[in-house]
Image (spheres, rainbow, N blue to C red):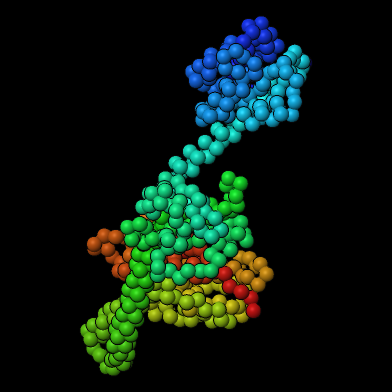
């Protein structure tokens, strides 16, 4: 009973015997759909077929033939690189002595079978040798595929022993280093390191200990150029030896770009520091005389002035206060932009913070004859932890906007406690006015820098457009959100949330 074929390979089998009936019998006994038989009646004819045909899977040789016997055919096959790997099965009518068997194996036989051949034994041996031949071909294919991948890999690959002696290198390794393949095979990795780099003892210990490692280093090319590389090394079994396989990648451009980015970042940070320092100095230099002017104007207002003088003094005082607010806004915006605004975590009384804000805008409200309504949720603790200055700036900016754009009616300030999670308390602030409102198509730009809903050259309302932009950044420091609702001609409501902590 023959073994069933389990692959799709076509096998060529050469049968050599000087008797035609033996050839026919062997062919009939071994016939299968995946086999092609080549027949030769002599040793000379067998060698002609072997030299002419490719991919012969098995040669079945009769030993005793008149011109060139099976021994000679086998010996010539072993001497030919193209033929030496073809399995040889000898068929003989002689008694198989040890000397006889040894001679055949030395020549290159894989087995013997005696005449008359037992059918089952013959079929089994042929099946085994063909299967071994197929496995050998598959192994060779895998090795060839590996070599193709090895030689066509985009990254340089060096295979070396634990002392750094290079065993093999692919095409990209030669291109990267500038050395030929043969040059590399006679080199040690130490020759590829710049002399300025310190030589470490047992440099491969980490790779051997962990089975692999990735690191950055420098490589000295043949032309003297030093480049930076990233190496991924791992243990590998190569031709039965324990070796190290190292993949290299040229990262010179990447490292150069990283250094350029770091330098640019350092320059930007230095420029930002200089700018912040300049603005801080300018803020101090401008605010000092401005505060003096505001103080003197206050004193002058308390003197005897006629109506015209008092009107001029009022205009001058308003202009001075406006200029002072502008300076404060610009300085605050600069601090936020540069990340120089620190968040404090101190105990505060929210009622006092809100009351101070109402006192600050009371003069503006009085001038426009506006009423300010304020309600604070009773559930809010009397003492909470947060940044009173940021909360105060948020409220004052939004109240200032509400007063600026409201000619009549009232303004409402409401503070509610939204939720409590552990010690975290989320507060919701609302500033509602009865002013001019905001057009729907302008709602998406009001929180941008230097932007106002009324952007015309002759706009009625002054200001830099920084107030809401500052608020949109300040609210992030409070871990909250800022948004607005408005109906043009009827008023606006600005909302912001803030996360504070219970004491």
**Residue at the extreme top:** 21
Looking at the image, which is closer to me, 226 or 312? Answer: 226
Relative vertical location of residue 439 with respect to residue 38 in this rendering, above or below: below
Relative vertical location of residue 106 with respect to residue 369 in this rendering, above or below: above
**Residue at 44%, 65% in the rendered image:** 472
The percent coordinates of residue 389 (x first, y second) are: 48, 78
Looking at the image, which is closer to me, 35 or 415? Answer: 35
**Residue at the extreme left:** 308
Considering the image in quadrants, where does the N terminus appear? top right
The percent coordinates of residue 33 (x first, y second) are: 64, 13
Looking at the image, which is closer to me, 182 or 428? Answer: 182
Q: In which quarter of the image is residue 385?
A: bottom right
**Residue at 60%, 50% in the rendered image:** 241
Q: In which quarter of the image is residue 262?
A: bottom left
Q: In which quarter of the image is residue 409?
A: bottom left
**Residue at 24%, 63% in the rendered image:** 458
Left or right of 252? Residue 79 is right
Considering the image in quadrants, where does the C terminus appear? bottom right
Q: Across the whole image, how many numbered discs are drawn on residues?
A: 0
The percent coordinates of residue 35 (x first, y second) are: 62, 15
**Residue at 52%, 36% in the rendered image:** 144
Looking at the image, which is closer to me, 95 or 430? Answer: 95
Relative vertical location of residue 424 with respect to residue 232 in this rendering, above or below: below
Q: Is residue 122 visible?
A: no
Left or right of 345? Residue 404 is left
Q: Can residue 260 be seen in this view?
A: yes
The percent coordinates of residue 448 (x first, y second) are: 37, 61
């Amino acid at each position: 009973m023959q073994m069933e074929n389990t692959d799709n390979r076509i096998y060529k089998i050469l049968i050599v015997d000087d008797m035609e009936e033996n050839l026919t019998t062997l062919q009939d006994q071994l016939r299968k759909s995946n086999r092609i038989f080549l027949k030769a009646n002599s040793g000379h004819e067998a060698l002609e077929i072997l030299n002419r045909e490719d991919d012969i899977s098995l040669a079945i040789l009769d030993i005793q033939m008149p011109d060139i016997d099976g021994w000679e055919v086998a010996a010539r096959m072993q001497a030919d690189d193209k033929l030496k790997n073809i399995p040889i099965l000898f068929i003989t009518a002689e008694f198989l002595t040890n000397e006889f068997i040894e001679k055949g194996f030395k020549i290159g036989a894989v087995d013997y079978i005696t005449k008359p051949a037992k059918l089952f034994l013959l079929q089994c041996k042929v099946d085994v040798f063909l299967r071994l031949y197929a496995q050998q071909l598959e192994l060779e294919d895998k090795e060839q595929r590996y070599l193709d991948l090895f030689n066509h890999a985009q990254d340089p690959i060096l295979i070396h022993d634990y002392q750094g002696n290079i065993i093999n290198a692919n095409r990209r390794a030669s291109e990267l280093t500038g050395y030929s393949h043969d040059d590399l095979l006679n080199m040690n990795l130490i020759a590829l390191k710049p002399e300025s780099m310190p030589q470490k003892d047992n440099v491969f210990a980490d790779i051997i200990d962990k089975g692999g490692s990735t690191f950055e280093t420098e490589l000295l090319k043949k032309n003297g150029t030093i480049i930076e590389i990233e190496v991924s090394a791992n243990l590998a079994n190569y031709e039965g030896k324990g070796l190290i396989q190292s993949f290299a990648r040229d990262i010179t451009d990447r490292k150069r770009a990283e250094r350029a980015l770091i330098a640019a970042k350092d320059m930007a940070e230095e420029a930002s520091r200089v700018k912040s320092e300049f603005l801080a100095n300018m803020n101090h230099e401008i605010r000092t005389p401005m505060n003096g002017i505001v103080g003197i104007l206050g004193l002058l207002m308390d003197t005897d002035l006629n109506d015209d003088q008092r009107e001029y003094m009022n205009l001058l005082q308003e202009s001075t206060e406006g200029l002072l607010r502008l300076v404060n806004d610009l300085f605050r915006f600069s601090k936020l932009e540069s990340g120089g605004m620190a968040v404090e975590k101190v105990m505060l009384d929210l009622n006092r913070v809100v009351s101070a804000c109402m006192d600050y805008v009371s003069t503006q409200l009085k001038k426009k004859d506006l009423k300010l309504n304020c309600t604070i949720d009773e559930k809010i603790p009397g003492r909470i932890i947060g940044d009173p200055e940021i909360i105060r700036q948020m409220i004052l900016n939004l109240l200032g906007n509400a007063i600026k754009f409201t000619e009549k009616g009232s303004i409402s300030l409401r503070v509610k406690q939204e939720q409590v999670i552990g010690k975290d308390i989320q507060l919701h602030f609302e500033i509602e006015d009865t002013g001019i409102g905001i057009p729907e198509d302008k709602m998406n730009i009001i929180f941008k820098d230097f932007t106002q809903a009324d952007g015309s050259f002759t706009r009625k309302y002054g200001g830099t457009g920084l107030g809401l932009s500052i608020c949109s950044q300040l609210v992030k420091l409070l871990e909250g959100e800022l948004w607005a609702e408005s109906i043009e001609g009827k008023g606006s409501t600005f909302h912001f949330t803030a996360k504070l902590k219970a004491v």
